[in-house]
Image (cartoon, coloured by chain):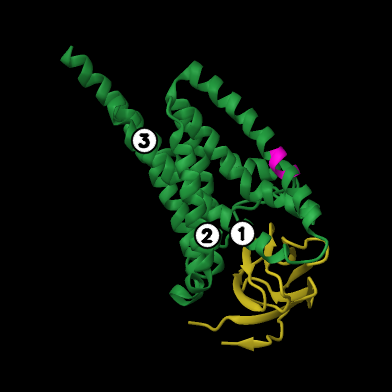
Chain colours: A yellow, B green
């Protein structure tokens, strides 16, 4: 079975770092979100059809894709004004941070 | 924090309100079951939340998603038991219907209510949020109650005109929608592979806005559903309808023959 590329996102002070994650088109990837706040957060995205609670000082994994090229917004449901980000899906080959 | 709390109520409390209203109209007379199942649901929710870190580790980190999907699957199956009871048309066996309804509300409280506990537990300790959270709670409850009253009147009107099967149909559409809503949970933990989107109507009615939330609660509306979600929705909605229609016709035929 082919490896799944992993992308890491950090949540600190109710902000996502990086707020833009670029992933390759038509590939399933694993998004790992590290919540470094002392409060829980729910990762939410209507366009990606994903929702997952990430407990305080904890991490959670979400599989996304395969996706068509485009921009897919995500946000923290408990802090939607600050915790916002975008998954950018591109055709070009991306350099994967980690591959299993 | 105010708007967040209101939105949380629309997303997670409204499904509980709608189910309770439908069942309240559907089941005759005795309403004591409602109080009992609220208490049971609250206790189960607290137990679930207290063990959520343990549950989260089950099945290689897929425990929470699988447990939420199982909750909704049971709610769906219990709705079919309600229909079976209705098709048998035996008023003496109403106790079973109350137990079934109680189970449905309790399981929905666990799956939806646990989100509230996480939210309030996490943020109530923060400074200066108590007032805005309370205000958001009152606003959210007010919106949910208003919609619940409207749904109650609509369900009552339908029941008086078309009989109890119409309220069961409302329940069936609701539980099918909720069941299909849980499928992305299985996709996000890579339990099933179903990411291909059937269509995208975000520009028409987005799930982000009020009507999207409302339609999602009432019949499981998704602006960008996967093909698997659409197939499961059609199958889960139509197959029981066909079976129970056939059962009803069969029973009517046999009772006609006896007379």
Q: Which residue is mark 1?
A: B117
Q: Which residue is mark 3?
A: B97
Measured Cα–Cα span from mark 3 to mark 2: 25 Å
Chain assignment, label 1: B
Q: Main secondary structure of the magenta part?
A: helix
In magenta stretch: residue A71:
no
Question: SS for tag 1?
Answer: helix
Question: Dot 3, crowdedness within 10 Å: few (<14), some or many (≥20)?
Answer: many
Question: Dot 2, crowdedness within 10 Å: few (<14), some or many (≥20)?
Answer: some
Chain assignment, label 3: B
In magenta stretch: residue B140:
yes
User: Do callouts 2 and 1 mark residues in contact (Cβ within 8 Å)?
Assistant: yes
Instruction: Please give the name of the residue rendered at 50% of the width and 16% of the height, measured from the top-left corner.
Output: B161
Kindly tell me whether residue B243 is visible in this rendering.
no
User: Do callouts 3 and 2 mark residues in contact (Cβ within 8 Å)?
Assistant: no
Q: Position of residue A89 (x, y in %)?
A: 72, 70
Question: SS for tag 3?
Answer: helix
Q: Is residue B221 placed above or below A13 in the rendered structure?
A: above
Q: What segment is highlighted magenta in the picture?
A: B139-143
Q: Position of residue B83 (x, y in %)?
A: 37, 34
| Figure quadrant of the C terminus of chain B | top left
Chain assignment, label 2: B
Instruction: Please give the name of the residue rendered at 27% of the width and 20% of the height, measured from the top-left corner.
Output: B252
């Amino acid at each position: 079975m082919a490896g799944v590329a992993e992308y890491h996102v950090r949540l600190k002070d109710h902000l996502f770092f990086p707020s833009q994650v670029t992933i390759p088109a038509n590939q399933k990837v694993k998004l790992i979100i590290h919540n470094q706040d002392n409060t829980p957060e729910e990762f939410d995205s209507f366009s990606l059809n994903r929702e997952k609670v990430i407990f305080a000082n904890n991490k959670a994994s979400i599989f996304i894709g395969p996706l068509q090229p485009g921009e897919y917004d995500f946000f923290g449901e408990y802090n939607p004004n600050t915790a916002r980000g975008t998954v950018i899906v591109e055709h070009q080959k991306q350099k994967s941070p980690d591959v299993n | 924090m105010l708007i967040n709390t209101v939105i949380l109520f629309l997303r997670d409390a409204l499904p509980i309100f709608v189910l309770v209203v439908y069942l309240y109209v559907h089941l005759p007379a005795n309403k004591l079951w409602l109080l009992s199942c609220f208490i049971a649901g609250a206790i189960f929710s607290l137990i679930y939340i207290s063990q959520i870190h343990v549950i989260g580790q089950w099945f290689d980190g897929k425990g929470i998603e699988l447990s939420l999907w199982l909750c909704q699957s049971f709610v769906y199956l219990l709705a079919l038991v309600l229909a079976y009871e209705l098709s048998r048309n035996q008023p003496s066996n109403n106790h079973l219907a109350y137990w079934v309804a109680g189970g449905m509300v309790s399981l929905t409280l666990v799956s939806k209510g646990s989100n509230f506990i996480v939210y309030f537990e996490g943020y109530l300790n923060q400074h200066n949020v108590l007032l805005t959270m309370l205000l958001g709670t009152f606003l959210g409850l007010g919106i949910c109650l208003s919609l619940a009253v409207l749904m109650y009147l609509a369900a009552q009107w339908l029941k008086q005109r078309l009989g109890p099967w119409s309220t069961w149909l409302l329940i069936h559409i609701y539980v099918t929608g909720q069941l299909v809503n849980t499928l992305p949970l299985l996709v996000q933990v890579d339990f099933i592979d179903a990411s291909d989107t059937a269509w995208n109507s975000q520009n028409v009615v987005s799930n982000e806005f009020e009507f999207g939330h409302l339609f999602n609660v009432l019949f499981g509306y998704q602006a960008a559903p996967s093909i698997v979600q659409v197939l499961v929705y059609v199958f889960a909605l139509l197959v029981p309808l066909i079976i129970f229609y056939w059962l009803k016709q069969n029973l009517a035929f046999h009772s006609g023959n006896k007379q």
